[in-house]
Amino acid sequence: MTRPDQLVFVVGTETEVGKTWASAALLRRWRTEGVNVSARKPVQSFDPDDPAPLDSEVLSAASGELESAVCQFSLPVPMAPPMAAASLGVSAPTLDELVAACSFDDGVDIGLIEGVGGVYSPLADDGHNLDLIERIAPDRVVLVADARLGVINAVRSATIEMGDLTHVVFLNRFDPDDPLHVANLGWLRDRDHLEVTTSIDALASALRFF
């Protein structure tokens, strides 16, 4: 794969925590600064009856790229990609194919790759997000988590599995007026000594200047 100057991988503690929203917001923020960005969602699965835009559509609009460049494998069944492929009677992509789908053009300052679901969610016939992360070796991993009750266990579980990978936690939907959200943030920062951000501006800065 052609590697950008900086490579970021976005994964969640689980599905529906706002990975695509955060990824798109990051891309838009960087573009306003004149940064040459590029996005890849190597595989996605979706509900064809859901009127919401596809992740690839959201990311391509945010990065200014063609949707076909952002996503190589798109499966219209709301299951994990290899399960969706099996239900459609087609071959699921392999890790090798997903690595190839994460190639970038020359001259990209920041490349962003978005996974599927949580760290161990299957996204290939022969692997999960963490397998792809280890193959790609990004400069930074963004772990997106919902700030609600249960986030401490979810974040701890995911970051332990990521080991020495350099990561930053983004607490999505953080409400500074919610005592639980504030307590969760403090615990993750003070007890677990994690780098945690709660705004896109702070996240964008953390990722650009490491």
Image (tube, rainbow, N blue to C red):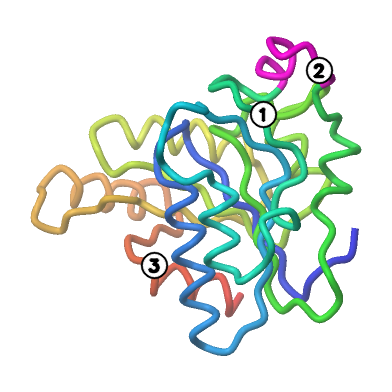
Q: What is the secondary structure assignment of the residue under circle 3?
A: helix
Depth check, front residue: 205 or 70: 70
Residue 7 lies in quadrant: bottom right
Query: Going 10% across and 49% down the picture, which residue do you hit?
Result: 178
Query: Where the C terminus falls, by quadrant?
Result: bottom right
Going by the numbered disc 2, the residue's amino acid type is Val
Whether residue 115 sits left or right of residue 200 in the image: it is right
- Residue receiving disc 2: 90
Does residue 14 lie above or below 113 as drawn? above
Crowd rating for badge 2 (residues with CA inside 10 Å; few <14, some 14–19, many 20+): few
Depth check, front residue: 115 or 199: 115
Query: Going 78% across and 11% down the picture, which residue do you hit?
Result: 89
* Segment colored magenta: 82-91
Crowd rating for badge 3 (residues with CA inside 10 Å; few <14, some 14–19, many 20+): some
Query: Where the N terminus falls, by quadrant?
Result: bottom right
Q: What is the secondary structure assignment of the residue under circle 2?
A: loop
Residue 179, how many percent across, how many down?
Answer: 10, 47
* The magenta stretch spans residue 113: no
Going by the numbered disc 1, the residue's amino acid type is Leu
- Residue receiving disc 1: 75
Considering only order in the chain, which callout, 2 or 3, is on the residue closer to the N terminus?
2
Depth check, front residue: 54 or 148: 54
Residue 18, how many percent across, how many down?
Answer: 41, 46
Select label 1 or label 3 by which is in front. Answer: 1
Does residue 142 lie above or below 80 as drawn? below
Instruction: Tally the marks.
Output: 3
Q: CA distance from mark 2 to mark 1?
A: 10 Å
Considering only order in the chain, which callout, 3 or 1, is on the residue closer to the N terminus?
1
Residue 208, how many percent across, how many down?
Answer: 58, 77
- Numbered circle sitting on residue 200: 3
Asked if marks 2 and 1 touch (Cβ < 8 Å), the reply is yes
